[in-house]
């Protein structure tokens, strides 16, 4: 089935999901400043990935693909590897001068190379440039001729790939192949196969949004000023505890922590892939109390006397939206908690600018401070 380069997944344009995948990928971290301009036009992301992947594959083919060991079971006329005694005896192979053997064989048909071949085939149908698509298909054929003939590995198997000193050159190639896997999104347009769409897989979208926001800040913020931490664990400020409370006490894991070394500030970001408001008891729209309690617990539990940034850390609850726009804040016991949305139906430039607003002052808040006003106490 030809993969469309445009369309929607639910209410979200595919090009914006491509943008999130770019931010979440290792490939984005490897791009230079000039190449990162691709994020201004997400429709071109598959073409950029295809161009870079084909260059990587061509270089690897000139130097030979990185081989790996594959286990094989064969009936041979001589012993190789380990003898399968049960199979040899049950089939009376010795009477025919044969023996069943199990051995490891060095070959190019590895999960890594199979994933690259599958990625090339996906991109050949996804890119807008026909010449580039033909180039992808041609390289996939060359990999087949080189012995890469097995089925492509699953994402889990591919995520377990490790790189040694001798095959470090494959890192970018595999990183690009992983991104190509993600770019080949099914849409809700008519096709010959029924596939589950990502907007119906809340866990998939939530993790994508979280990783994309973390990747964006990690690559965009000035590392001389900012320190970006993802997936950091916080400890409850427990004074006393019973013997088994540790077995049932829930853990606290933040999505993203940004620390500005120059301004001496800390921002704790928690990403959600749900609507920022819900219907309340007495009003049409209300913030979700559970999320507010969660952020409040994050901010208070990280307070430490020896940590100067902990007393004034800011919390940001960041939600994606479809058309909605929220950027509101309040202050509780020395901590500002901000509620923001990122409109995933907006342009790539608007999405980028909105994410950058997370590390900037909120306009209305700044005006209140400039005018010498304070928020009403609740």
Image (cartoon, grey):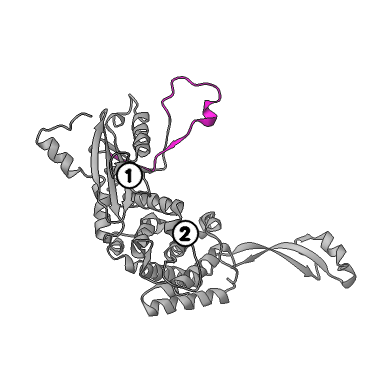
| Label 1 packing within 10 angstroms: few (<14), some (14-19), many (20+) | few
Image quadrant containing the C terminus: top left
In the rendered image, which residue does mark 1 sit on? 279
Give the distance between the C-alpha atoms of the residues marked 1 and 2, in whole angstroms. Answer: 47 Å
Magenta residues span 236-260
Q: Residue furthest left?
A: 371
Viewer-nearest residue: 271 or 116: 271
Question: Earlier along the polypeptide chain: callout 1 or callout 2?
Answer: 2
- Expressed as whole percent of the image width and height from the top left, the position of residue 171 reads 47, 59
Q: Secondary structure at mark 2?
A: helix
- Expressed as whole percent of the image width and height from the top left, the position of residue 3 reads 43, 72
Viewer-nearest residue: 52 or 14: 14
Q: Is residue 256 within the magenta segment? A: yes
Q: Secondary structure at mark 1?
A: loop
Residue appearing at x 24%, y 36% in the figure: 330
Residue appearing at x 13%, y 40% in the figure: 367
Residue 272 in view: yes
- Expressed as whole percent of the image width and height from the top left, the position of residue 57 reads 47, 70
Residue appearing at x 27%, y 63% in the figure: 40
Residue 79 in view: no
Q: Nearer the viewer, mark 1 or mark 2?
A: 1
Viewer-nearest residue: 132 or 172: 132
- Expressed as whole percent of the image width and height from the top left, the position of residue 221 reads 28, 49
Residue appearing at x 32%, y 28% in the figure: 307
In the rendered image, which residue does mark 2 sit on? 171
């Amino acid at each position: 089935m030809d993969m469309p380069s445009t369309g929607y997944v639910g209410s979200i344009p595919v090009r914006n999901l491509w943008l999130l995948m770019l931010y979440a990928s290792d490939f984005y971290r490897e791009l230079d400043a000039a190449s990162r301009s691709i994020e201004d036009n997400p429709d071109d992301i598959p073409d950029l990935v295809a161009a870079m992947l084909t260059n990587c594959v061509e270089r690897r083919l000139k130097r030979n693909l990185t081989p790996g060991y594959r286990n094989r079971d064969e009936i041979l006329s001589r012993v190789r590897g380990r003898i399968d005694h049960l199979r040899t005896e049950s089939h009376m192979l010795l009477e025919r001068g044969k023996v069943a053997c199990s051995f490891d064989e060095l070959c190019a048909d590895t999960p890594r190379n199979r994933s690259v071949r599958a990625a090339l085939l996906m991109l050949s149908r996804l890119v807008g440039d026909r010449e580039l698509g033909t180039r992808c298909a041609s390289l996939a054929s060359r990999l087949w001729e080189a012995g890469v003939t097995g089925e492509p590995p699953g994402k889990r198997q591919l995520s377990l790939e490790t790189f040694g000193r001798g095959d470090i050159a494959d890192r970018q190639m595999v990183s690009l192949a992983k991104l190509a896997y993600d770019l080949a999104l099914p849409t809700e347009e008519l096709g010959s196969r029924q596939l589950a769409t990502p907007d119906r897989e809340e866990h998939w979208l939530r993790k994508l949004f979280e990783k994309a926001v973390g990747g964006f800040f990690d690559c965009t913020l000035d590392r001389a000023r900012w320190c970006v931490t993802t997936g950091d664990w916080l400890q409850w400020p427990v004074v006393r505890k019973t013997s088994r409370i540790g077995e049932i006490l829930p853990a606290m894991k933040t999505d993203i922590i940004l620390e500005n070394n120059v301004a001496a500030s800390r921002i704790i970001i928690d990403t959600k892939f749900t609507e920022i408001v819900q219907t309340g008891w007495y009003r049409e729209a209300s913030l979700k109390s559970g999320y507010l309690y969660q952020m409040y617990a994050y901010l208070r539990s990280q307070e430490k006397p020896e940590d100067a940034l902990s007393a004034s850390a800011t919390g940001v609850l960041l939600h994606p939206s479809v058309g909605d726009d929220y950027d509101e804040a309040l202050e509780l016991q020395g901590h500002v908690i901000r509620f923001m949305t990122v409109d995933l139906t907006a342009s790539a430039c608007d999405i980028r600018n909105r994410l950058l607003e997370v590390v900037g002052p909120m306009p209305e808040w700044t005006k209140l401070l400039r005018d010498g006003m304070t928020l009403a106490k609740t």
